[in-house]
Amino acid sequence: MIRNYFKIAFRNLWKDRIFTSLNIIGLTAAFSVAILLTMYAVFQLSFDRFHEQAQYLYQIYSEDSTPNGFKANLSNPEPFAAAFKNEIAGVEKITRHRGSGILVSYRDKQLNMHASYVDPDFFTMFSFPIIKGNTQNPITSGSSIVITEKAAKRIFGSQNPIGETVSILRDEKEVPFTITAIAKDFPNTSSMGFDIALNFKSQPKHAYARNIGRWDMKNHEVYMQLSKEMTPDQLEKSTTDFTQLHYRDEIDNAKRDGAQPNIGGVYKQIRLLPVSDIPFANFSQGKAIINRTMPYLVFGIAILIVCIACFNFINMSIAKSAQRLKEIGMRKTLGANKLQLFFQFWGESILIFLTATGLGILTASLLLQPFQTLFKTKASFETIFSPSALLGLILSLTIITIISGGYPSLLMSRLGTLQSLKGKIEKNGKNFLRNGLIIFQFGITILLISGTLVLWNQVEFMRTKDLGFNKDQVIAFPLNGKRNDQQAIQLLRDALEDKTTIMSITASNNILGFGKDGNRSTSFMGFEYKGRGVNTHMLVVDKDYVETLDLNLIEGRSFRKNLASDSLSVIINESMAKQLNEKEILNTKIILEDSVAFSVVGVIKDFNFQELDRTIAPMTLFALPNWNLRNVYVKVAPDNLEQSFINVKTAWESVEPNAEFLGSFLDENIERTLHKERTMIAMIGSGSLLAIILSCIGLFSISLQVVAQRRKEIGIRKVVGASVSKITMMLSADFLKLVFIAFIIATPIAWYFSSQWLQNYTYHINLTFWIFLTGGSITVFIALATISIKTVKAAIQNPVKSLKTE
């Protein structure tokens, strides 16, 4: 019986191959894209959930009260971790963590790698399995290190690295370290990563030795494992005495400067952030705000695309039913009951959905690699091949098939025998549903197109915004060789001295934007000024920094060529000048620790040294001759930028033959900071494109049915003198009205969500009606073009053919 249903269903589908093909193509496209987008969303939501103790792992941060409100502080002082574990109940394990780039040497190899300085508890807290070597205490010694499988292959090839010695550049000296263990490579869903793990005490002097016992110097993160008997809220509330004891001076200064306590009456509150929430954490008013908008948005787009495809199927099936009325009447006359008719038509739907599902999975597998490249993701089928995910996928497809295939089947099986034999069907209910689904489809399409246009305009605004420095003619790269920084910079200047395209060379201790080495950094400091606390970002620079980056000097002077003569001078930005609040800012003295006084010699216009979603903060430039300047900036002439880049690369390779050149223009660095927004554009843009295609497939198939039903009316109108354009507009008008209604509904929704999203950016575009009108116009134009394919053909057809009787 069932086989007979499917046999007849296959025969009917094969007989109307255009209808079948359109449905299968639409559903296949929707299912394949939905699988890829769901894979991406699940992958993003899976970050850091693989740790065995994930539900008990937290990052510690503090909610600090300042005169300007509450601020979150993720950095901690050297003695914090040990004191916190000893004095606070509920701390089962704790580890400090600080990431840094290091230079590793082994025989004739010299490699730049990413290091994590951690405490011994690190490998017992986090699930990064040791697969070779000391599995119990791999980094108890200050000279022992753990490397990952990939790092081991880079350094040693197929050789067993356990017990081997490598040299790591520290404090301008090569220090030997012994490899005691190999860690399994990190899962793709880990937000934490390193090539080499070292004992926290093995850091350079400026990062560790100089900070021992100091509560006023903060430069690393702290993670803890919470006891199963304690809740995060309980632990947070129990830390008041701890902060009062160890941060008394900081709290007293905050009170003196006019800071207000939080709702609990506390000026410094310890907070816990679940490790699995870290990838989604933004900080506002001192607290972590978890924002999973991106994966949920992607998952939402996947659902909407499937909905559009299913609504297409429903509309097309209902439209097609008008051509099968006599078949339904004959079957009922010959004794078929409603249930038999239902299963007959539902069998056709099942065949279409099964075919589309199989083709969708195949298409998704073929598109996986381009998808991973386009969206820079490591999401794969493994992400959704867990038992729970597979069960969810099967249930979803089953529900979709039951609803999308079952409703038209139910509608057709309920038709009366006489009504079917007459070839007529009640139109009101059918048209109401059809029109509602078309409005929904095009409403979603307009919403996605408008969202894409807003995103694109915002990214272009950020990309082309005047950042206050020259990003187009400046090449930046890290000093990742063995030489002393100052020596390397001077040798680089000597190597490029005869190149006419090289305009100036400078260096600093931070990189602007997001460097090619994957690093970006800023330093932060605070000091007392006239009885109040002042905070500023700190940048140590070489001579010609202001000139190389074309920073706008609005008052005073730049640093002298003889940098040593300016070792007690600083240049500040406008925001810092406002914070100092002096009428005569030049020669103002700021006194740092050890009573060292620095004099303000210049003021530069504010420039964006951080991400563009942040307000420009106070910045102070220092000229400290013996400071480590790990990043070089080379300003080149605007002509022949490619050759200038090659010249800089060649010069650096002559200075450090074994060091990798990781140079890029600053505009590339800035572009890397826009990766999240670019991904959103690609996601929503792709969804918009597919939504348009699917909506147009449905609109085209429905227009086929409408034209077929009104064939004689078209013929009569042509006979009485109607023009092709009038007939085309008559046939298109009803559909265009639906698109217009969709525009009216979708535009306010798109406006609301766009305005909410733009609030995340300090600098953003102003929403205008033209953006949304453009989205609506694009949709109307495409819809009209789709409908016209068939309506124009019907309008120019010879009326004699239309008026022939059967």
Image (cartoon, rainbow, N blue to C red):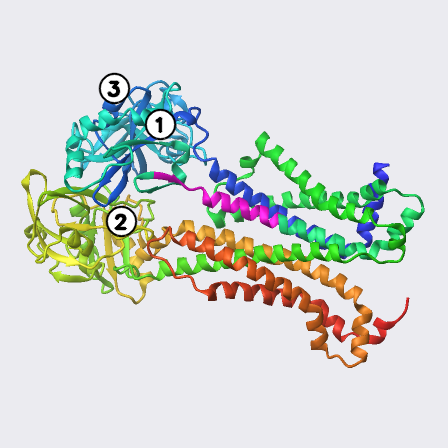
What range of the chain is rendered magenta? Answer: 288-306
Amino acid type of the residue tagged 3 in the rendering: Asn
Q: Earlier in the sequence, mark 3 or mark 2?
A: 3
Q: Amino acid at mark 1?
A: Asp
Image coords of residue 779 (percent x, y): 58, 63
Q: Mark 1: few, some, or many residues within 10 Å (few <14, many ≥20)? A: few
Q: Which residue is mark 1?
A: 233
In three-dimensional space, the C-alpha distance between marks 3 and 2, rounded to whole angstroms, equals 38 Å
Up-down relation of residue 270 to residue 256 (above or below): above
Residue position for label 2 = 511
Amino acid type at image mark 2: Ile
Of 28 and 137, the residue lying toward us: 28
Q: Earlier in the sequence, mark 3 or mark 1?
A: 3
Residue on which the image places disc 3:
86
- Earlier in the chain: of badge 1 and badge 2, it is 1
The percent coordinates of residue 506 (x first, y second) are 19, 54
Q: Is residue 363 visible?
A: yes
Residue 396 is inside the magenta segment: no
Q: Residues within 10 Å of mark 2 (few under 14, many from 20)?
A: many
